[in-house]
Image (cartoon, helix red, strand yellow):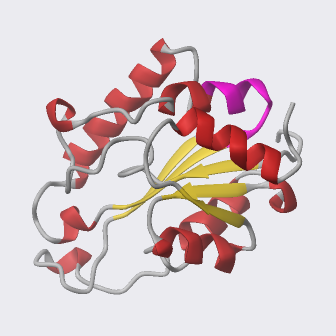
Amino acid sequence: MSAARPALFLDRDGVINVDHSFIFRREDFEWVVGAKSVIRRFNDMGWWVFVVTNQSGIARGYYTEEQMQDLHNWMSAEIANAGAHLDQIYHCPFHEDGTIPRYTKDSYDRKPKPGMLIRAMTDFPVVKERSFLIGDKQADLEAARAAGVRGFLFTGGDLAAFADWVLADMGEGR
């Protein structure tokens, strides 16, 4: 197993891609400015990089887990083309108001609950005290707080510039 290191947790919709609501097709996917370069920068710094994303569109019947996985595979390939990688993508397909019975339930993984972050910190040796999450909703920040990591609210713009600000705020700037 690798040595323990800090982790960058990224929400997907609204942080990595522009949130156009229930994105599952690559033709609807629009990268947030700076998203790929942030992932590459944190890879180069030796941090874990995880995506933690609620995907209630699966429970609601808008798309399947397979369609979401196809999009995630494409995203990963695009990120690799930029010289970077994601260590893991965690998703929660569950929602209490779903229409697909097997996904219609509450889940500890659904943000604002911390399940996906805790699972990442169980699957990988993470230095929790130096780790943080960037999300675009209060639920993201609540999940980070519940998991014991700092959370920062991204409201749009250049994700790379925002991540620079976060690193400086945490005293991690290089």
Please report the residue visible at 76 percent of the width from the left and 38 percent of the height from the top.
47
Give residue 166's position: percent from left, percent from top: 71, 49
Q: In this rendering, would 115 be left or right of 164?
A: left
Please report the residue visible at 70 percent of the width from the left and 33 percent of the height from the top.
42
Q: Is 2 in front, or is 24?
A: 24
Please report the residue visible at 47 percent of the width from the left and 75 percent of the height from the top.
139
Give residue 16's position: percent from left, percent from top: 43, 41
Vertical placement of 23 versus 71: above or below?
A: below
Residue 99 among those drawn in magenta: no
Quadrant (top left/top right/bottom left/bottom right) for the N terminus: top right
Give residue 32's position: percent from left, percent from top: 40, 36
Q: Is 32 in front, or is 130?
A: 32
Quadrant (top left/top right/bottom left/bottom right) for the C terminus: top right
Q: Magenta segment, which residues? A: 40-48
Vertical placement of 60 versus 113: above or below?
A: above
Vertical placement of 26 versus 94: above or below?
A: above
Give residue 2's position: percent from left, percent from top: 83, 39
